[in-house]
Image (cartoon, coloured by chain):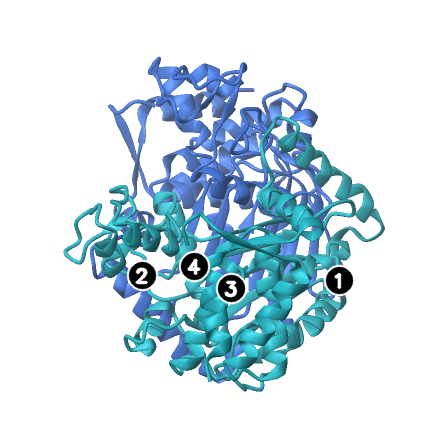
Chain colours: A cyan, B blue
Amino acid sequence: MSAGETVHLTLDEVRALAKAGLAKTGLSPDHVDAVAETMVSGERDGCASHGIYRLLVAASSVKSGVVVPDAVPELSEPSPALVRVDGKGGFAQLPFRLGAPLLAEKARKFGIAAMGLNNVVHFAALWPEVEELTRQGLVALAVTPSHAWVAPAGGTKPVFGTNPIAFGWPRSSGEPFIFDFATSAVARGEIELHRRAGKPVPDDWGYNADGHATTVAEEVLSGAMRTFGGHKGSALAAMVELLGGPLIGDMTSLQSIEADGGRGGSPIGGEFIIAIDPAGFVGDLLAEYMKHAEVMFETITGQGARLPSQRRYEARKKSLVQGVEIPAALMRDIEKLLEES
Amino acid sequence: MSAGETVHLTLDEVRALAKAGLAKTGLSPDHVDAVAETMVSGERDGCASHGIYRLLVAASSVKSGVVVPDAVPELSEPSPALVRVDGKGGFAQLPFRLGAPLLAEKARKFGIAAMGLNNVVHFAALWPEVEELTRQGLVALAVTPSHAWVAPAGGTKPVFGTNPIAFGWPRSSGEPFIFDFATSAVARGEIELHRRAGKPVPDDWGYNADGHATTVAEEVLSGAMRTFGGHKGSALAAMVELLGGPLIGDMTSLQSIEADGGRGGSPIGGEFIIAIDPAGFVGDLLAEYMKHAEVMFETITGQGARLPSQRRYEARKKSLVQGVEIPAALMRDIEKLLEES
């Protein structure tokens, strides 16, 4: 989607469009609601790649049989402070919605709790889920493996997914502190954009299939990407695999890409989320300790540095009032989808 | 400590030396035991900077009044799945020993549990604690703030500590998967070594007090270090501050360096540890899912890449049989300490 002609939409129009498009794919109504909401969040926060554009990705996932469109997720409690939701092969959003209230309840009751989403199709960012938990006053950490596309530090063959880590901290005034980043050096979509544009990539983004550094985007996509931050990023990527895979009884990224069998579908597998009650340790002193966190945030922003989600919140503030602009070409693709019989 | 003359010691001799030296500082016997053991672990695993050398650091911390030598840590249970140990200003090792059995018990009972150590003096690595929990079959994650020495991405003034993150995963055969790294670009000790040697540092290690990149080690030490991995490492450093500080009712790195008041002591504050029962989600299928984790490890090592702690384990294997070599100059300093009246 290059710059150029755009179409103006209010966020309600984005929501209506997302719902109509998702319904058209054959997704059951509760999945439509849950998935549409994350597309609205992405578009609202200026994350075009996680916005209404994902409608096309979702439609293709349903059409190719990668996702079960009418999956009915199933909730269980394998241990007192653990929640498990089997997504039965459907999109991840509805299982999260189903399990989040119980996760929050357990975090408040025990001080800390965790949730595993199993057998779900991921195609959204983790920050909307982490933000939802901070809105309920909880501290949250979420990770998910994906497809084996990323080489470990010291190697050149894929083992890890892009393996994002997201964290959220509630703030009494203003928006929560939230980060959500891939442990790969760059997003896979970034390499994809270079491929489409026929542009070379920097030679430290990845390796070709022979294990040599390459500047050809296509070779990185079929070879291996690198982790961010050298051996430290690689160690974190392994942690994400373990927590979001074997720990919760789900697939590693190696297993996920094998299960995909070359269909090129969105990663299927698990997601692991920890929720902590910030009053659990400090009780009545919560407000005082929250102030110390605020001093830290102010020391960051006071020197002109940004907090991780600051850009998103600025976009949000604007789009809630003014709506959003989406590329005309994307709008035409969506209209085509809506007209399909 | 430059290379050169060395003294050979068995690990039992290292232990005896550490205990004698620590006792000499006036540390109470249970603190002596706990602290000595982490020095033995460091020396055994080839981490000289966390080995017997730390005896001099510990002695100086006691002498300068930074640490309470006979602190009696106090255990409490602020929430069903949370353990809190108030270290009363003593070293962190004894509070960890006191709380770890209850943390492990709660992790097995609830599926997940967490521990906050408060008011403790840190001068060791986190991996011995994480490894201890993996030996009990648990998955563990530990973080601790330190002194405000590190600038956030996009800024040049100190906010964060070197803020390590350690993670451990138990393995039925062989040594656990463990990583433990600072979220700063390099260890502070590394810059210190450059300063002593009068060598310039790379210009991406930190900033001088005016906020400019510098190659003068001393200026970085009195200015600000950088985080690893750009804005991602910076986000993680903030997470460590929040979890190991306000969440558990303890100090941020900004507060810790202020409390130090220029004494140059080891960081005082909190440590946050999560323990998870790997059978919590998967129950009887544990062995099967552990195998999937092993496949991932083998795909890493099978392509010639190292697992994070591989070097330590190789050193351990050797030193358990052959003992260790310590610099003769260090041995003389330790003997001097032992002779002091």
Q: Are marks 3 and 1 in contact (CB under 8 Å)?
A: no
- Can residue A16 be seen here? The reply is yes
Under tag 3, what secondary structure? loop
Q: CA distance from mark 2 to mark 1?
A: 41 Å
**Callout 4: residue from which chain?**
A
Q: Position of residue B258 (x, y in %)?
A: 68, 25
The image shows residue A183, relative to residue B219, as above or below, that is below
Q: Are marks 3 and 1 on the same chain?
A: no
Query: Which of the labelled discs sits on residue B79, or is there none?
Result: 1
Q: Is residue A148 left or right of residue B100?
A: left
Q: Are marks 2 and 1 on the same chain?
A: no
Query: Which of the labelled discs sits on residue A124, or is there none?
Result: 3
* Nearest to the observer: residue B196 or residue B121: B196
**Among the two numbered marks 2 and 4 on one chain, the one whose residue lies closer to the N terminus:** 2
Q: CA distance from mark 4 to mark 1?
A: 31 Å
Q: Amino acid at mark 3?
A: Ala
Q: CA distance from mark 4 to mark 3?
A: 13 Å
Q: Between label 4 and label 3, give the one nearer the viewer.
A: 3
As drawn, which residue projects farthest toward the right?
A284
Q: Between label 2 and label 1, give the one nearer the viewer.
A: 2
Q: Amino acid at mark 4?
A: Asn
Image quadrant in which you'd find residue A222: bottom left
Query: Which of the labelled discs sits on residue A163, or is there none?
Result: 4
Q: Is residue A283 left or right of residue A190?
A: right
Q: Position of residue B32 (x, y in %)?
A: 56, 40
Q: CA distance from mark 3 to mark 2?
A: 18 Å
The image shows residue B95, relative to residue B184, as above or below, that is below
- 10 Å crowding of disc 1: few (<14), some (14-19), many (20+): many
Query: Which of the labelled discs sits on residue A149, or is there none?
Result: 2
Identify the image quadrant of the C terminus of chain B. Answer: top right
